[in-house]
Amino acid sequence: MKVKIFEFNPISENTYVAYDETKECVIIDPGCLFPDEKELLLHFILDNDLVVKHLLNTHLHFDHVFGNAFIYDQFKLETEANQADEFLLAQMPSQLEMFGFGKMGNVAIPKIGKYLKENDVVTFGNQRLVVFEIPGHSPGSIVFYNEEAGCVFVGDVLFRGSVGRTDLVGGNHEQLITGIKKKLLNLPGDTVVYSGHGPLTTIREEMKTNFYLQ
């Protein structure tokens, strides 16, 4: 499996396109906000003759869903996310206001087309993404684990040297740390961690050096 990484919007959010030799792909957390960002993502998909099978969200904070409506318009794919985060979509205007995006009243608010829960499996091409629920950063935070490819897409659950903030609505630090230790740190050490912001890391590296997980 190959993974293309884009860094979008003023909050430097990581958007991922995962694909394989079949040309089928998934888009994870499309944070593209500006027209040039949307075109960059679209051109990558079209130029590589990719067929988008799923639009996946690790969670529904605004910086991870800016591009959801655009993806729907282009490919008629509805958002797939955990139901516990659905309330965040209704609160999106207040989220934007809180982070200084209040003048962006034209941002389309997506709807969830399919709910994802613990142990669900998302398939595309020859790939399988297993869903783990790890709340704490948001109530509905989920991650997508590809055992065969040796990687996990964690959204804002885990970062290199840090973990997701828990001071937003529905956050719970103890719940987050418990979920990380129970569900992520048991993965093979060389599992590559694709986070919602910042650089890649591995499970082994975070077990050894992440202050929050000691």
Image: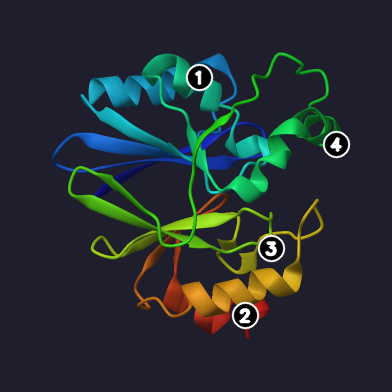
First along the sequence among labels 4 and 3: 4
First along the sequence among labels 4 and 1: 1
First along the sequence among labels 2 and 1: 1
Horizontal side of residue 44 vs 39, given as left or right: left
Q: Nearer the viewer, mark 4 or mark 3?
A: 3
Q: Is residue 170 visible?
A: yes
Q: Is residue 154 visible?
A: no
Query: Residue 149's x, y, as percent?
Result: 26, 60
Q: Give how far apart the Cα atoms at labels 3 and 1 are.
A: 28 Å
Is residue 142 shown above or below 161?
above
* Total marks in image: 4
First along the sequence among labels 3 and 2: 3
Query: Residue 55's x, y, as percent?
Result: 43, 35
Which residue corresponds to the image point at 39% horizontal and 76% vertical from the top-left?
Answer: 187
Please identify the residue farthest to the left as the structure is shown: 21
Query: Residue 14's x, y, as percent?
Result: 52, 43
Q: How is the image coloured?
A: rainbow
Q: Where does label 2 land, which residue?
A: 213
Q: Give how far apart the Cα atoms at labels 3 and 2 are.
A: 14 Å
* Disc 3: CA contacts within 10 A as few (<14), some (14-19) or many (>=20): many
Residue closer to the observer: 2 or 130? 130
Q: Where does label 4 land, which residue?
A: 98
Residue closer to the observer: 21 or 123? 123
Q: Where does label 1 land, which residue?
A: 70
Amino acid type of the residue tagged 2 in the rendering: Leu
Query: Residue 170's x, y, as percent?
Result: 77, 55
Mark 4 and 1 residues: CB-CB less than 8 Å, in contact?
A: no
Q: Nearer the viewer, mark 3 or mark 2?
A: 3
Q: Give the label on residue 9, or none.
A: none
On-image quarter of the C terminus: bottom right
Q: Where does label 3 land, which residue?
A: 136
Is residue 174 shown above or below 49?
below
